[in-house]
Amino acid sequence: MVRSTGTLPAYSTFTISDTFATGALLHASTTDTVTALAVGSAGQVVRSTGTLPAYSTFTIPDTYAQGDLLYGSATNVLTALAKNASATRYLANTGTSNNPAWAQVVLTDGVSGVLPVANGGTNASSASITAFNNITGYTAAGATGTTSTNLVFSTSPTLVTPALGTPASGVLTNCTGLPVAGGGTGATSFTSDAILTGNTTSAIVAESTLTYDGTTLTLGGGQIAFPATQAASAGSNTLDDYEEGTWTPVIGGSGGTSGQTYSVQVGRYVKIGKIVIATAFPVLSAKGTITDSVQIQGLPFTAENTTNLVSVGVNRWANLATNWVYIDVYVDVNTTIAWVEGATAAAASASTGLTTTDIGDTSRFLVTMIYRAAA
């Protein structure tokens, strides 16, 4: 590099690099040698290594707000903890990976020492009582006794909270007949494992036919009643419904149904949780108008809306207008219909849906279907 000597130009005794990258910093790496320090990664700062400048391996944020505290959030990473504007906060190690975080004092494990009565405490480190009127920091006028003797009141106080009522006789530990209205059970004994129920406002009884031994619930009466309206549960191990009832099966068409009359039109179902067992025996006396594919319509519950989850039912038939070697039904998803299909000759797998031309005025089906309901 050409420089002035004060009188004439002359080449300098120091040397510099031929090229520099954008953002590089020049520094003397040795005597009379200028070297470029390449720009560091975002957030790194220039620091002294003791001999030469270098970019730090740690990073710091670009900006800070008033009151921020810096802490190492990971190896070689400085992070700003924003100030907490709420009063009575302190720094705790409750952040992610025990990083600093603002918190409040947890009374169960965040304090030590004994809190005096004047500050809302007991002024005691344990609940040990040597005498009723000798709890440290407290007095109870007119009461004596220790943990190994009965409590004796010098007067006869009325216990207001809780209101225990008036025992029939004797002291409370030995009295009999304490009624339900007075906070008792109205009973003197209970059968082992029996479940307690209230029969009136004056007594609680132990059910002799309803017991629970900690493992098994036994119903001596043999019945469980579910509400008329299902209380649906999302629990996979929860039985939330049982129901028995009737339904009206219809032999109809996918494109329209009208004008049918029946000599028999019987349907029954049992629903256990989501499982529906539906039986039907419709017998036509006039087929009316059945358009397009034949269906059994009016199932008692909508089928579960799960793709490809169709349920096949068993079927017997009679008095059709055409001959079939087999016929079955399947319940379609998210509907209350079952399609009727079959084969007119032996086949490996193919089946054909019945249409109006296959149904006669006295056709009948006897069907049992098992499917999953939507709820």
Image (cartoon, rainbow, N blue to C red):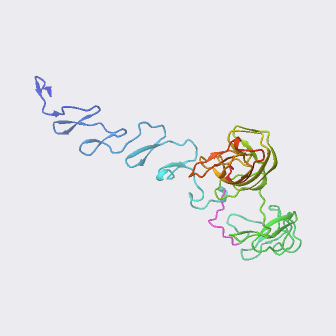
Q: Compared to 66, does 184 lie above or below?
A: below
Q: Residue at x 43, y 36 (%)?
A: 63
Q: Residue at x 41, y 44 (%)?
A: 78
As rendered, which of 173 and 256 lies closer to the eye? 256
| Secondary structure, magenta segment, majority class | loop
Q: Is residue 56 among what the camera can see? A: yes
How many numbered marks, from 0 up?
A: 0
Residue 77 highlighted magenta (yes or no)? no
In the rendered image of this protein, does residue 107 appear above or below residue 284? below
Q: Residue at x 87, y 71 (%)?
A: 177
Horizontal and vertical percent for residue 87? 58, 44
Is residue 158 in view? no
Q: For the N terminus, give its image quadrant.
A: top left
Q: Nearer the viewer, residue 91 or 202?
A: 202
**Image side of residue 28 versus residue 101, left or right:** left
Magenta segment range?
A: 120-130
Q: Position of residue 213 (x, y in %)?
A: 71, 71
Measuring from the top left, give residue 364's x and y in whole percent: 75, 50
Quadrant in which residue 291 is drawn: top right
Residue in the foreground of this view, choosing between 371 and 374: 371
Going by the picture, which residue comes out furthest to the bottom? 148
Among all residues in the image, which is located at the extreme top? 7
Judging depth in this view, the residue of 53 and 145 nearest the camera is 53
- Among the 4 quarters of the image, the one containing residue 141: bottom right
x, y percentage for residue 9? 11, 24
Q: Is residue 62 above or below residue 278?
A: above
| Residue at 77% in and 57% down | 226
